Amino acid sequence: MDDTSTTPPPAAAKTPTGSSDRFGYEWARYAELKPVYEEQFRRWTPFMTPEDWRGRSFVDVGCGMGRNSHWPMSYGAAGGLAIDIDERSLASARRTLAGHPTVEVRRTSAYELDERDRFDLAFSIGVVHHLEDPDRALANMVRAVKPGGQVMIWVYGLENNRWIVHGLTPLRRALFSRLPIGVTHALSWAPTALLWLLLRLGLNRIEYFRLIRGFDFAHLRSIVFDQMLPAIAHYWSRDEVEALMRRAGLEEVRLAWVNEMSWAAIGRKPS
């Protein structure tokens, strides 16, 4: 499949592929829970205030090292389920969420999630755009929430990212995603150094660059590495993200432009 396509593919009968093993390497290496991650989480979930999480149950689809489940729990969420499929990601998530015993960390993929009418909210941050079959994953998230519950995602936007689609994506597909993951990580140092320099020389064209200017080098490197490693990465326009949500049967769909380079979306499961 051509992963530069911006149109979500139709559902498939086979088990779709992804990059869970490569992200497992990332979440084992970058497993520290940093306070700055909260600001990122708040931007990725613009429809939710800390008060909105209180007492709510959730499922975090593609939890990585668990940081996006940690913040809701720190705001007073009731608990829920955090799922991923790479054991290194799950080990990091269990450490991150050790202080939150009402969150279960489970080895399950977005395609295998079989909960029904259980949670108040299903969310997935930075995962759906890496899936071969995003429609299938989103359908499972809708099924997992109670009638009247909400489903929320954050995904890469096409707007302001065409330079990645036409520049980095061909290089990633042909080289970085095929190299041993340790080699790809080693190669991430040079573009990180260039980005670090450009940010300090005044690169601030969009809000995202203004945000990451304050990040330390290791945090910047994790971001650059994250862009280099996956086998699949979709960059979707606003209309395509809205269509993805509506195909899942969600109502009251709302979208928010995040950092001028990505989309957050939320919708409600019919009662």
Image (cartoon, rainbow, N blue to C red):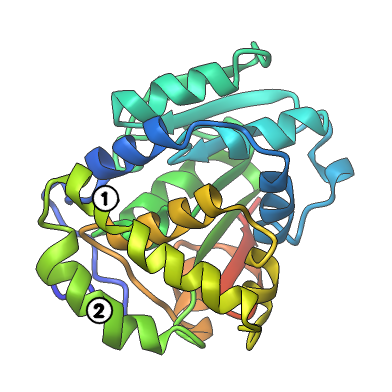
Question: What amino acid is labelled 2 in the image?
Answer: Thr
Q: Relative to 96, say whether 230 is above or below.
A: below
**Residue 66 falls in image quadrant:** top right
Residue wearing tag 1 = 186
Can residue 161 be seen in the rendering of this structure? yes
Between residues 85 and 40, which one lies in front from this camera angle?
Answer: 40
Q: Which of marks 2 and 1 is nearer the N terminus?
A: 2
Check disc 1 and report its element: helix, strand or loop: helix
- Looking at the rendered structure, the secondary structure element under dot 2 is loop
The span from disc 2 to disc 1 (Cα, nearest Å) is 25 Å
**Residue 13, position as x, y percentages in the image:** 13, 52
Q: Residue at x 60, y 75 (%)?
A: 199
From the viewer's perspective, tell me whether residue 176 is left or right of residue 50: left
Q: In this view, does 8 lie above or below 46?
A: below
Q: Mark 2 points at which residue?
A: 4
From the image, state whether disc 2 or disc 1 is nearer to you. 1
Are the residues flagged by discs 2 and 1 in contact, CB closer than 8 Å? no
At 36% from the left edge and 81% from the top edge, which residue is drawn? 164
